Amino acid sequence: MIWRNLCLAAAFAVTGVLAAENLIDAPQKLELERATYRKITIKWEYPADGTQIAGYRIYRDGKEISRSTETVFTDTSVVPGKYYEYSVDAVTTGGKSSDLSAPLKVKTFDSVDFAQHEQVESVVDSLHDMPAKNLTALSLLSAIKAGFESLTGSSLAMNTFDTELISQMISEELEVIKTAVPDWTDAERIAAQAELDACLKESFGGHSMEQVYIYERLTTLAEAHWEKGNKQAAAILYEFSLKFLSDQENCVSSTLNRLSVFKVAHLTAESGADEVEAALAASASERLRFFDFFPDSKGNEARFIYSYLAGQYFRHFPKLLPYDDYREQAFLAARSCAVKQQELFGKVPGNNRLEQIEAWQLIRVKVKLHDAAGNPRRGSIKVANVTADTKPELFPDEPYYEERTFAIDGEAEIPVYAGHVYEITARIAISGGSDLVLNLPSFPQQDDRQIVYDTHGNPVQSPATNGPTAEIVVADSDFPYNLRFERDIDVFTLSWDWVDTADFKAAGFKVFNGNTLVAAVTGNSAANIRLAAPDGNYTYTVAAFDANGQLSRFSVPVTVEPGDQSAHAEFFEWLRQHFGDQPVLSTDDSDGDGVDNYHEFLNGTDPTCAPAPTPSDKQVTYTKITLNWECAPELSEGAVWTIRRDGTEVGTSLTASFTDSGLIPGMEYRYTIRGEFANGSGTDWSAPLQLKTQKPETVAYGDKLQQVVDLFNPIELADYTAPSLISAVKSAVEAVTGANITFTVVDESLLEKLVAAEFELLRESTGSMTAAERLTLRNELSQMMAEDFGGNSFEHMYIHSKLAELAEEHWAAYLADRSKTGSRTAAEALYDASLGFMKNHQVTVYSTLYRLAAMQ
């Protein structure tokens, strides 16, 4: 593995060599050709002015070091990481010397301290003389590999790394190198070099360009391997990049951050706690290596490391810190990072990470349950985590609720989190009665706290000597217990439990507000207790009393405050308008009509009046409408009912029924009803009831039909049987037409059967429906007729259906005995008569004509 590292480092070193800056000597264009660790090559030009040059003298740091007849020179006596200044002069064939060229300052590569770095430097230097124009990625890789093999005497393999990725990167770099450099003047070259030096000094601590370049290439190639799924190679490359720019906090932090991310990248929502804990520990170890490089760092990088690690652990707390498998080391690691961050950088406003973490510290509370004599008692404790209600920020993700129940027989241990919010309730078995329910406020969620709860007293806290402890002392149950209330608008109901003892038998209970008696009852609850307390005391207690009036011990007090009543402001104003300052409550029935004030308010009725009747239609014909209405039973006797039609009084009634006559067929009318009593009081006006008389008939005998129908409004079904109704209708028709009616076509027995069936249906439905139900049914029927039957009236549809039904009965009689031709004639006549109704409804007309055609 180490040879792979060396091999790769060498590859980048050579690439760095080839990409080095070409410094240009403006006067005679003395410039750098190439510099490595122990070699520097420079070149120059001489003006083409015809001068015969015999050779050149090369000076390094002011001393002549060599002579050459060529315009290029390689210095092999340099050492790594040192600056050298070169200049050149020319010697003519006549022995004359030129002035020195402008100086050229060059620096060799810095040596990097890692294992076998000398072998790497030797390979790089061995490639110094390879022409850049002849280089390819493959030849360069091969040359590096061959160089290492010659130095080490063994073959090298690069199985860990992706050769294709490396070749691609080198090819891209070679293209840059082979591109012609700008033809700068000396002034431009010097300015560019100065700018580069300033950049390296300000941003990279004065490191050389080749070190910055190698670091950048290593990290870029590492990311390429990671994205391609080669995790091992990515980690090796990032690890090796730490050899370069290792005194630059941002570079080291960036590399370690990536190595840290690699350690947790495999985690998913399904990962187990063991896997998560191990991955987080490995990730933290990578990030904390930063302080191996910079032990005294207090900069932004250090701040980020502690902050990130604390947050990373916190995000996994629900999985790492369950009550029954609490990972103490994970908690301590998270808290350590949060504490260190706060110690070094102080508390940052808005950053409450330390509080969030410490809220998850596990506290194991010892719970003791016994009576005053120390005898153990049995019960259970319910622990509900309600942190989500008030401190949702303590959860790393979506806040949640949890509930646990622990059985206790004298003693138990209950684990809780130090900073979470709990509702904790004890249920203690009481012989002969309901369990005593005791809320446990101020539960000891710190190691140094203990508390004693008394079922008939206040909790007492004190410092803990043996860890967090909650002690519950069960007092004798000779007092009402489990006080609970149900708040209404301006009153509340108080309930409690009680168990008779050998020495005290309860005959009833008294409820006190402070020292004021507010209720006395025989059962275990008191209703309609006024919420308002003029003296501001909202504390209530209950005591039992025996047959002699002696009181038991008082209950533990309960506080019942009115709470926010702004939602009922409109109701309270309504009360004031009707009752002024009288102490009237929402539950009072001020007018004695069986409806309390609040429901009078909701109904929009007058609380000083009896409730309005509920009207409905009993019978609607062409010129008559018969109304019925419902009212409270106690209002039905002795009332005089006034009926208004369209706002005008049209009559009165002593019963809950009224028939309005003289109406116009097909017109809508609006009725309201009000009751008045002998004492001068009355009901509200009813809600309006809108009814429409039957449409006028268009058949030839329509006017006579209307007269006959109106004669039977109102009709009492109980007064008729099917035969008697048929006879009455026959008589009415004869009276209207002035002619006798005989059943020569229609089978009277079939007609009676049909009428009897309708009687039965009507009696069943009308007897079981309330006025409100009848009104609802009429509205639904009207909607159905409008949508499905072309706006025809229900009465027309009914008449048509009954005529068709009777026609089918006659047709069936004919088919059973074809000698009964009269039945066939009756069927045809009845179907023909039905066409006078629903005649604008295509489906009905088509169906009727189809049946008539089938009878032919």
Image (cartoon, helix red, strand yellow):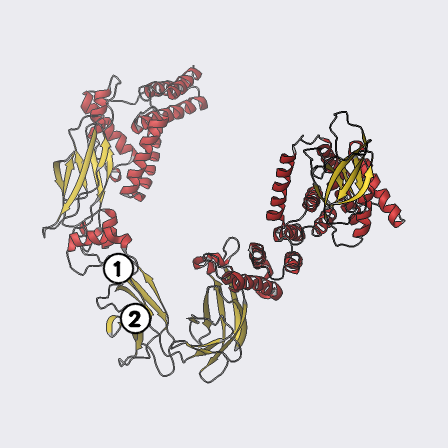
Query: How far across and down, in percent of the image, does residue 219 sit?
Result: 68, 45
Is 105 situated above or below 181?
A: below
Position of 77 with respect to 309 (left or right) is: right
Q: Position of residue 112 (x, y in %)?
A: 74, 52
User: In the rendering, at what x and y percent does residue 289 appear?
Assistant: 66, 58
Q: Is residue 76 above or below residue 367?
A: above
* Residue highlighted by disc 1: 490
Mark yes or no: residue 11 visible. yes
| Res. 613 image quadrant | top left
For the point 77% across and 43% down, which residue is it?
11
Residue 823, placed above or below residue 499? above
**In the picture shown, does residue 335 fall above or below 509?**
above
Measuring 78% from the left and 40% from the top, which residue is drawn there? Answer: 58
Q: Amino acid at mark 1?
A: Asp
Spatial CA span between label 1 and label 2: 16 Å
Which of the 4 image quarters holds residue 672?
Answer: top left
Residue type of the residue flagged with mark 2? Tyr
- Viewer-closest of 387 and 118: 118
| 437 sits left or right of 325 in the view | left
Residues 359 and 367: in front is 359
Could you classify mark 1 by the number of other residues whose Cα lies within 10 Å: few (under 14), some (14-19), or many (20 or more)?
A: some
Q: Between disc 1 and disc 2, whose residue precedes?
A: 1
> Label 2: which residue?
540
Neighbour tally class for label 2: few under 14, some 14-19, many 20 plus, Cα within 10 Å: many
Q: Element under label 1?
A: loop
